[in-house]
Image (spheres, rainbow, N blue to C red):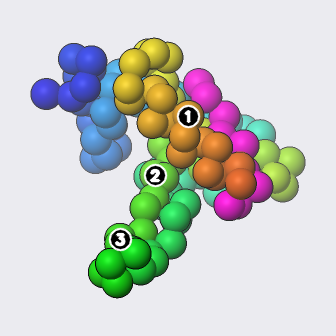
Amino acid sequence: MNKFYAKKVTIDGQTFDSKKEALRYEELKLMQRAGVITDLKRQVKFEIIPQCKTVGGRLAQARYYIADFTYKERGMLIVEDVKGYKHGAAYELFRLKAALMRWVHGVEIREV
């Protein structure tokens, strides 16, 4: 079961975490067909904390943010995350990752 009881939805052979995310994908596909956006991608992985050594000398894994969608709008990269709930621990973790995306990549995540 998905967090917050969202139902997984499959469209075009791709599985989405929620109906809201699947509907957004349909909108973005239409926008791409109309030429409003280009280069639509799903589940794009961005490194936000590189692998590093801990104080004890062990290797700590790199950490990533995975965007629901990326695309170009008027030549500018847009990183989008579909949110159903804007509260709780999961949303706070997202806010931390969004801040790291701004700092590391200079990218503002667009919440939908």
Assess whether mark 3 and mark 2 are in contact (beta carbons under 8 angstroms): no
Assess whether mark 1 and mark 2 are in contact (beta carbons under 8 angstroms): no
Distance (Cα) linking label 2 and label 3: 16 Å
N-term-proximal mark, 3 vs 1: 3
N-term-proximal mark, 2 vs 1: 2
Magenta extent: 104-112
Kindly identify which residue carries mark 1.
95
Please tell me in which quadrant of the rendered image residue 98 appears.
Answer: top right
Indicate the amino acid at tag 3: Gln
Residue depicted at 25% across the width and 25% down the height: 3
Distance (Cα) linking label 3 and label 1: 20 Å
Instruction: Look at the numbered disc 1 and give the secondary structure of its residue.
Output: helix
Q: Residues within 10 Å of mark 3 (few under 14, many from 20)?
A: few
Q: Position of residue 52 (x, y in %)?
A: 45, 77
Q: Position of residue 103 (x, y in %)?
A: 71, 54
In the image, 24: left or right of 11?
right
Q: Taking the image as drawn, is residue 71 in sight?
A: no
Q: Taking the image as drawn, is residue 22 in sight?
A: yes
- Residue found at the far bottom of this picture: 57
Kindly identify which residue carries mark 2.
66
Indicate the amino acid at tag 1: Arg
N-term-proximal mark, 2 vs 3: 3
In the image, 84: left or right of 75?
left
Residue depicted at 42% across the width and 69% down the height: 62
Residue 61: give its label: 3
Q: Nearer the viewer, residue 11 or 6?
A: 6
Indicate the amino acid at tag 2: Ile
